[in-house]
Every structure is written in structure tokens, then in C-alpha cells.
Amino acid sequence: MDWSFMLSTFVSLVGAMPLTLQLAATSIFFGVLLALALALLRLSGVPALAWFARGYVFVFRGTPLLVQIFLIYYGLSQSPAVRHSLLWPILREPYWCAVIALTLNTAAYASEIIRGGLLSVPNGQVEAARACGMTRLMIFRRIVLPLAIRQALPGYGNEMISMVKATSLASIITLMEVTGVAAKIISETYRAIEVFIVAGLIYLTINFLLTRFVHVVEHLLSPHLRAPRLAAPVQGEAK
Amino acid sequence: MNQPGFLDVISFGPGGWGGALVAGAVMTILIALCGFMIGSIIGTFGAWAKVSGGRTLRFFADGYTTILRGIPDLLVIYLFYFGGSAAVTAIGRLLGSDGFIGFPGFLAGSLAVGITSGAQQTEVFRGAFRAVQHGEIEAAIACGMSRALRFRRIIAPLTLRHALPGMGNVWQVVLKESALVSITGVAELLRQAQVGAGSTGMPFNFYIVAGAIYLAISTFSGAVLQRSERHFSRGVRRS
């Protein structure tokens, strides 16, 4: 194996890592907000809103992400109304198109995860909160949301990992993130295996760290599942 | 400017792209089916290695699933497409032909899709095997069935029943993943839409139609899967 080639590949791929991370972080951040809104619409009890959320999830989970990216990046510019609108400076940039597509896509998947979390909150908890005289908003903020987050976190961790993987599609609309740079090196040198190993290692490292991070947060959020730490004996009590 | 209307573009008549899109949809289904079958075969062996393999086999199976689930599918497709071409060219050179030989995109695509989905299938089959009750296997042993008979009559059908929902999910993922194969130039649905979009200058129409066809395929196959799930678990009592 050609180590100097692999090292130079590694250096150029690491240089592309910030873009991958930035794409993933931006779309995960906006995606989770949209997902929460969608989950709340779905559970709102208003048929029109619930059906909207249902339809959204159906469409975005039923079509390939690449089609969504193409539709936003190439498709929207077909209409002159879009080209002359205020949004054009954003929709013209491949970066923002990728972020929009990834956000809309992850929101569909994540809203189902969050909905599952919200549904898993035991009714007794909500009843107890109501009995304490909390308002609806306060119940949601203090009781329902924290419990739902704890429940949804493992599933959401998987979704974050698939988002990191999904950022690779941004390379198809000319963004030079890790996969884009890898593809460029492969097509220049035709040394697919070496480049694949290096790029794969980078993705595996990102995803491994992400998994560890989710585990740590899970651990912090579930102190009730751990054995209580033994309190230090009170001084001077036993005589 | 006399632009053709939306319906003219996707019609089946002269100048219409309806036929090309349908042919692309058929190709998409073929790629997905091939990939899914390759994935199922890999998944069977992977699950077998994880459940009853020795330490080495288990190590390799674990490594395979960890790596393939942490690496973008696009990267795997690049590996097979470019790596395959490099390998075929090298073999051709050994046999005395000089010059570049391309690796067929269909083969590269379905192999790549198969290998990535194989990692998911491994986990699906492993979980399903775990769900088979031990008593059933013991009863089969007590009846004096041989290992092969036990697998054919008891373990395989019961595992399949438990695996069916998970396999349905993998199928949906494979179907959407097959869109990535368009980068190898195989004339599947998204590729046809790209060609159409390029030659008519109406990307929005083509990508919307492609998305609708993907949605139709996934909805239809989802309904089929649901029916077969009901069929295969007709002996199960529901509480």
C-alpha cells in the first residue's frame, strides 16, 4: 500500500471535514426544530394540521433524498418567479440548497421519532402536573418535553448518524465536502480502494464520536435508572 | 417562446418523455430488486456468522455491519464503480488488451446497494432469529429432526415471519438508495429525469414526476409488504 499517497489523501480529506460537519450540524439543528413542530401538528388533534404533517412525512420519506436535492437546486430555478424573488440569493447557492433539502428530509424522519417520544409520556405524569395546577405550556415545558426527549434520544441518535452520511449527497451538487473531495481524487487517480479506506475512516470516526456523545447525553438524562450513589455517612450521628 | 406544457413533456407521444420515464422506473425496480436480493443473501450469512459463528467469524461480521452502517452509501458506490473499472482494466491488461475498460454501472450499483443493505439485513435477521422461541427449536430436536430439516422447517419460516417488517423497511431504503446509482450513468428513473431535464430545460417538471413515481412505487410495495405480513402471521394470535 502506498502510504504517502494515503497520507496526502488524508490531508486533503480532513480539509473537507469542516464542510461535512457544518452541513450536518446546520441541517440537524433546523431539522429538529421543524420536526418538533411537525410532531406537535400531528398530535394537535386538529384534523387539517394532523393531515398536513402526515402528508409531509409521507412525501419526504417516500422519495429519495437525491430527488429532493435536485428538485430544490435545479428544479426551483426553472420558475422565473423564484429567480426574481428575494430568496434567490439563497436558492442560488448549492450550500443552502443542500441544507434546505437535508433539513426538510431529516425533519420528516425525526418528527416520527419525536412523536413516538411524546406519545410515550405516561398519562399519570401529565395528570399529576395538572393536579399541581400547571398551565398547559408549563406542563409541556417541564414534564412532557423532557420525558419525550429522554425517550426519543436513542432513535434520534441513529437519525443524526444517517444525517452525517446523507451530507455526502451534497457532493453531487458540486459541494466539496469529504465525499466530494474523495470522488475527485478517485476520478483523478483511479485508486478507489485507498481513497475509500481513508474517507471511510473519517466518516467512521465522526459517527463513532457522535454515538459516544449521544450515549453520554443519554446517561446524563437518565439518573433514575442508575443505582443511587451512596451518600457519605453523616458525621457524628452514630454514637 | 413556445415552451411545451407540463403534460406534453411527460406524455407518451412523440416528443414526450413518458416512455423513457417508465423504462427508467423499470430499471430502478430491477436495480433495487437485485440489490435487495444480494443484501438478503449477505444478511443471511451475516446473521448466521453473528449467531452461531466462532470468534473470528463474529468479529468479521461485527466489523462488516459497523463499517457499512457508518459509511455513506455514495462512497460505496464510488468504490465499486471506480474500483471495479480499475480491477477490470488491470485484468484486461493481463490478458493483453490495453486501454480502459469500464465496469458496468448496473453491476456496480446493485453490488454496492446489496452490500450496504446486507449490513442492515444482517441485523434484521439476527433480531428475528432471536425472537424465535427456544421451545420451538427444542421441540424440533425432540422430534429427531436433523440440523438441515430443523432449519428448513422450523427456523427459516419462523425467522422470516419475524423478519418481514424489518425486511420491508430495508426494501424501502434500498429503493431510495437506488437513486444514487444514477451517478454511474445507468438509465434508471432519476438518470432519465436528469436527461429529460437537461434536454428540455424543465428540471422542476421532471424531478416532480420522478419523485411522484418513486412515491408510487414505495406506496405500492408498502401495501404489498403489509399484506404479506398479514399472510405470514395468520397463525399468530393477536392480543
Image (cartoon, coloured by chain):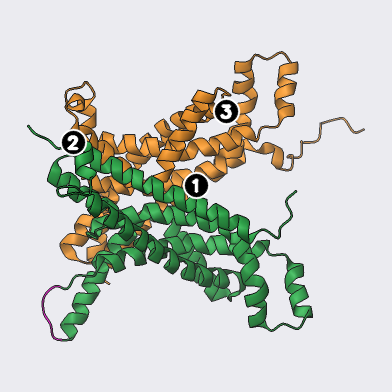
Chain colours: A orange, B green
Q: Which mark is residue B5?
A: 2
Q: Amino acid at mark 3?
A: Leu
- CA separation in Å, label 1 and label 2: 43 Å
**In terms of image quadrants, where is residue B157?**
bottom right
Crowding around mark 3 (Cα neighbors within 10 Å: few <14, some 14 to 19, many 20+) is some
What chain is tagged by disc 3?
A
Q: Which mark is residue A158?
A: 1
Q: Is residue B232 left or right of residue B78?
A: right
Membership of B136 in magenta stretch: no
Between residue A65 and residue A204, name the one nearer to us.
Answer: A65
Between residue A143 and residue A200, name the one nearer to us.
Answer: A143
Q: Is disc 2 on the same chain as disc 1?
A: no
Residue position marked by numbered label 3 in the rendering: A43
**Which quadrant: the C terminus of chain A?**
top right
Q: Which mark is residue B179?
A: none
**In terms of image quadrants, where is residue B101?**
bottom left
What chain is tagged by disc 2?
B
Q: Marks 3 and 2: which is nearer the front?
A: 2
Q: Is residue A119 left or right of residue A184?
A: right
Between residue B187 and residue A184, name the one nearer to us.
Answer: B187
The image position of residue B124, as x and y in percent, is 55, 60
**Which quadrant: the N terminus of chain A?**
bottom left
Magenta stretch prevailing secondary structure: loop
The image position of residue B50, as x and y in percent, is 57, 69
Q: Residue B65, relative to residue B193: is it above or below?
A: below
Instruction: Say if residue B62 shows up in the picture.
Output: yes
Q: Is disc 1 placed on a helix, strand or loop?
A: helix
- CA separation in Å, label 3 and label 1: 23 Å
Contact (Cβ within 8 Å) of mark 1 with mark 2 = no
Q: Is disc 3 placed on a helix, strand or loop?
A: loop
